[in-house]
Image (cartoon, coloured by chain):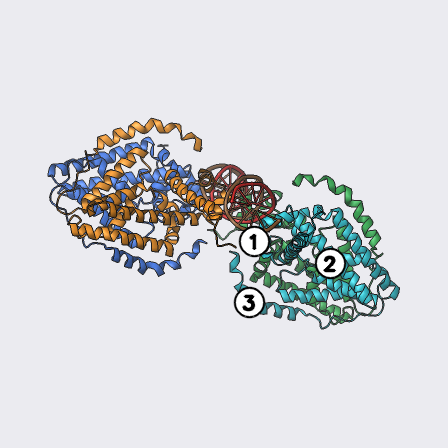
Chain colours: A green, B cyan, C orange, D blue, E brown, F red
Amino acid sequence: MRTTGPLRADARRNREQIIETARAVFAEQGPGATMDEIAQHAQVGVGTLYRHFPDREALIHAVLADGLDRMVALADAARSEETWAWDALSRFVHGCAELRLDLLVSVAGAQVHRVAATPEIGEGRARLLDALDRIVAAAHGEGALRTDVGAGDVMGAIGLLVRGLPTLPADLGEELRERTVRLVLAGMRAHPAPAPPGTAMTAGELIRRLSEHGDEQGDEQKKDE
Amino acid sequence: MRTTGPLRADARRNREQIIETARAVFAEQGPGATMDEIAQHAQVGVGTLYRHFPDREALIHAVLADGLDRMVALADAARSEETWAWDALSRFVHGCAELRLDLLVSVAGAQVHRVAATPEIGEGRARLLDALDRIVAAAHGEGALRTDVGAGDVMGAIGLLVRGLPTLPADLGEELRERTVRLVLAGMRAHPAPAPPGTAMTAGELIRRLSEHGDEQGDEQKKDE
Amino acid sequence: MRTTGPLRADARRNREQIIETARAVFAEQGPGATMDEIAQHAQVGVGTLYRHFPDREALIHAVLADGLDRMVALADAARSEETWAWDALSRFVHGCAELRLDLLVSVAGAQVHRVAATPEIGEGRARLLDALDRIVAAAHGEGALRTDVGAGDVMGAIGLLVRGLPTLPADLGEELRERTVRLVLAGMRAHPAPAPPGTAMTAGELIRRLSEHGDEQGDEQKKDE
Amino acid sequence: MRTTGPLRADARRNREQIIETARAVFAEQGPGATMDEIAQHAQVGVGTLYRHFPDREALIHAVLADGLDRMVALADAARSEETWAWDALSRFVHGCAELRLDLLVSVAGAQVHRVAATPEIGEGRARLLDALDRIVAAAHGEGALRTDVGAGDVMGAIGLLVRGLPTLPADLGEELRERTVRLVLAGMRAHPAPAPPGTAMTAGELIRRLSEHGDEQGDEQKKDE
DNA sequence: AATGAATGAGCTTTCATTCAT
DNA sequence: TATGAATGAAAGCTCATTCAT
């Protein structure tokens, strides 16, 4: 009946803890992660999870919304802390990729639309685009960003790059994603060729790296059956 | 296993039909697609599906393996039909994106490793890398591809670009992916600036496009409940 | 794909078995009976139960509809087999009470309306009223039934008498219901006083009967805790 | 337990408020009503509810006991205020039906026995039968009540009539119950035919009344989903 | 060999009960 | 003391897999 003053402290901490955990668990376990598992990792009972989020969809929605908030924060930080808009852009894109929103985007499958079609998500997206737009405009002003690349393009690219390569061993997947991010940034860059993405990942190198991981993985897999 | 001659035609057609359908259904419905649903779309009973693929994992495995085969075919066709290696590379990357292996990569969640760690998949990957490597080598020879970008990089980029942007309306998602693919290719290109990806997708444009779709989506959503 | 020819035999038997069991279990265990319990008693897996009835509400609906069918059959049999319409009416009312639709009516609580507001139930009710109406008309013709009592009154009375007295031991509850049924019939009867309901159930007798049951019940109750 | 003097007033009011609310909620929502719902309607927190009644069973027990008390009061009032015993009896039966103990009897389902087997309930029942017995004896003396109908019969009938007809629209259910009560009373009456229950409820009339309600009900049903 | 009904383990969700505030 | 957030056992329901037809 009170306007939610005192008790909220615990509840709020709990809520945030759950969202944070959910992102992590979804990223690691994939879309199949169970509610119980998430609750467990968040150190709460399932009941508590359900008190905060009436159903699975609501939780996913919250994680998505929270992810947008973080991206906005990321964009703002990048813009205010970097001297050059291009550096801010680069930092933003790299930062987004590290948020590991990964598999989440595919969690709900066909229902994603419903989850993402919320006014709250829409507004978050708008705020993000707004923040990003300033960086993009500045980068255009600097002459560093191709003029035929807009904030929408950056968002689209991030939507793809933000995920993982779950079929590959974790570290290799990370590395390849990093390199792809750099390629995209290179592709966005105006005239002067951007910093090269390091040494090429050749076919041979990739195969060698893959075979290295072959053995380690065999161990921990029987437990699922 | 190899002794049945005549019946093979029907069986094979059935098997391929199921794989084809499975890819489509996974791409549309997401990882949550059920075996019954796939069987239904493939116009067979679940029993038949299980006759061909002992369990869900086997089906996913088959779809992945088949996807690799298609990519190899794509690479070969591109190489033999295009005069310039760069064009072959570009055609290959664009073609892969259209295979709509989309959500499949995340279907199995945590089990993906197990599914992808099969010798058959490993071999398929090797063949693909091999085919791709020839294109990459030729492109290097042409001077069109940056020397610090290898076949492994191309594969990594494809792994990310091959998916959709399920939170966006289908056509908008497609367009943004297309543009990102072009950006990546631009980033891979050596000195001479590559063909620009058209007109920039600005923040305003993106938001406008999103709001256009707001209404259409409301209709088809009740059926899930 | 076939028009449901051969396999249906088993399925139909199963379906009927489940409905039959559900009525019995609801009557005995009360509205709290679980789906698993019903499935168990019906000798099928829960999955089978759910294949036939998508959810709890559907099952309740089916039991209600089936109950109506039985009542119609009861009315028809009574009318064709009894010489006097009054006897048919009496037999019908007594018979309905024995169907033990008991607690079912309250199973769904507030949702009962939704369950009972189906066209199928409505039609069943209409058929029942129709069958009953003929008996009532004949009984009126015989001069045995008060003219200020109609088929609707009979239905209303049955709706109340059909249930049990779950707070009492089973046999005592049965006996009292029987007696109440006779009282209602007596109240419906025209001029000549109907057969008396036997010896009075006095307060002392009722209390004595209740105390008899006190001990027997203590045993089987600990298992619930 | 009996040592607290001053606070008792508030506590007692609270306790009674909860019992009263519980009866109403059980009557409306059916046996599925949750503790939270009852607490909410009673304007208290669940914690408070549990302070008064250690568990659900205790609450049900209290409502039952309270119901018995009210019936006793009803019987006493009827006896002292009516000149004729028959009128007292009639008033008592009608009054009980209005208590709306309705669905409560089936709330506990299989556990009803345990709840109703309490000494307190037993004693309440005894008191009620005692009070009722005096009315019945007087009615016998008046020659208005059939001698083969005892207080136990009246109790049994009330147990059945006290409930509602939840599958019907509220007002129609009420009307039919009223008419059934009158029929039972008519059946209990000695020689002289009792006052007729008004105009017959014919099958046609019942169906007409049912169809009238068809539309109104559709509205309030979505809120459950 | 193909079919789809049956199965039941396991996941989502609810709610009686407890307990920190 | 009253409150309502947290808890987790248990219920409803789903769907991968099996098996009778």
Helix, strand or loop at mark 2: helix
Query: Residue A113: where, in percent of width, then height?
Result: 58, 60
Nearer-the-camera pick, C46 or D163: C46
Query: Residue A117: where, in percent of width, then height?
Result: 57, 62
Left or right placement of residue A162 versus residue A62 in this view: right
| Disc 1 from disc 3: Cα separation | 21 Å
Residue type at mark 3: give it. Glu
Helix, strand or loop at mark 3: helix
The label number, if any, that marks residue D207 in the structure image:
none
Nearer-the-camera pick, A1 or C182: C182
Pick out the residue farthest to the bottom: B199
Q: Earlier in the sequence, mark 2 or mark 3?
A: 2
Residue underneath mark 1: A57
The label number, if any, that marks residue B70 in the structure image:
2
Residue C222 vertical position relative to residue C189 in the rendered view, above or below: above
Q: Count residues near mark 3 (Cα–Cα under 10 Å), then give few for <14, some for 14-19, many for 20+.
A: few
Pick out the residue farthest to the front: B6
Residue underneath mark 3: B216
Q: Which is closer to the viewer, label 2 or label 3?
A: 2
Left or right placement of residue A158 versus residue D17 in this view: right
Query: Residue F16: where, in percent of width, then height?
Result: 60, 46
Q: Count residues near mark 2 (Cα–Cα under 10 Å), then give few for <14, some for 14-19, many for 20+.
A: some
The answer, for residue D123, to whether it is visible in the render is yes
The answer, for residue A86, to whether it is visible in the render is no
Q: Which is closer to the viewer, label 1 or label 2?
A: 2
| Disc 1 from disc 2: Cα separation | 35 Å
Quadrant of the frame with the C terminus of chain A: top right
- Tags 1 and 3 on a common chain: no
Q: CB under 8 Å between callouts 1 and 2? A: no
